[in-house]
């Protein structure tokens, strides 16, 4: 998929809503060769998905060996809105707490006092973190209004063709 096509998908209003969410599912290949899909906090900076993790997280060794990842960001309501992304993870170890980590946790409902305590606890726990950065190289939005899963689109075309005979 070329970058212009990816950018067109990401620019759609539903895609923008989904990219503003705090949580996605990250899929990658673990060191033992089996697939993993984990929930992870995200921050969209306009061109990349940024995730942050502990420097000792097990997923880091797997991502160093095979940086290919897939992300799913979706809603819980019907009809679901689903944004599917693919790309390669770049790892960036940083000292302290990345600003994206603090931003990605911004929509959780916390009082100002709870937020301040949460930030103090985070700063006390982490000396540094690893930023996992993914620039989407493939994207598909499924909104069940204007876009559907590919298999459903194919079945609909097949049924329409059969009905036309």
Image (cartoon, rainbow, N blue to C red):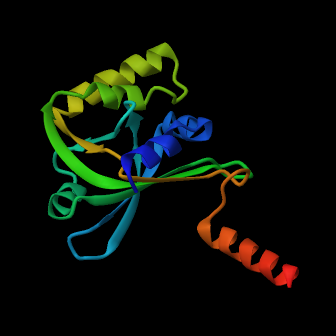
Q: Nearer the viewer, residue 49 or 127?
A: 49
Pinpoint residue 1: horizontal percent, then vertical percent.
40, 57
How many numbered marks does the figure carry?
A: 0
State left or right for residue 35 relative to residue 155: left
- Residue at figure coordinates x 47%, y 37% from the top left: 22
Residue 12, above or below 152: above
State left or right for residue 107 relative to residue 158: left
Residue at the extreme top: 112
Pinpoint residue 132: horizontal percent, then vertical percent.
26, 44
The answer to which quarter of the image holds residue 38 is: bottom left
Q: Nearer the viewer, residue 111 or 89?
A: 89
Q: Nearer the viewer, residue 93 or 144?
A: 144
Q: Quadrant location of the C terminus? A: bottom right
Q: Nearer the viewer, residue 55 or 73?
A: 73
- Residue at figure coordinates x 86%, y 79% from the top left: 164
Pinpoint residue 97: horizontal percent, then vertical percent.
23, 28
State left or right for residue 97 relative to residue 44: left
- Residue at figure coordinates x 33%, y 31% from the top left: 101
Pinpoint residue 159: horizontal percent, then vertical percent.
79, 79
The answer to which quarter of the image holds residue 63 is: bottom left
- Residue at figure coordinates x 46%, y 26% from the top left: 106
Residue 60, above or below 55: below
């Amino acid at each position: 998929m070329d970058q212009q096509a990816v950018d067109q998908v990401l620019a759609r209003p539903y895609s923008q809503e989904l990219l503003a969410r705090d949580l996605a599912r990250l899929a990658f290949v673990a060191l033992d060769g089996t697939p993993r899909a984990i929930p992870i906090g995200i921050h969209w900076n306009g061109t990349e998905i940024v995730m942050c993790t502990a420097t000792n997280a097990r997923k880091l060794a797997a991502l160093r060996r095979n940086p290919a990842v897939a992300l799913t960001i979706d809603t819980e309501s019907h009809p679901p809105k689903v944004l599917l992304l693919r790309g390669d993870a770049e790892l960036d170890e940083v000292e302290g707490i990345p600003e994206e980590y603090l931003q990605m946790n911004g929509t959780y409902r916390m009082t100002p006092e709870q937020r301040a305590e949460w930030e103090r606890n985070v700063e006390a726990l982490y000396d540094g973190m690893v930023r996992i950065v993914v620039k989407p190289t493939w994207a598909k939005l499924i909104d069940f209004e204007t876009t559907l899963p590919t298999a459903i689109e194919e079945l609909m075309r097949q049924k329409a063709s059969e009905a036309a005979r």
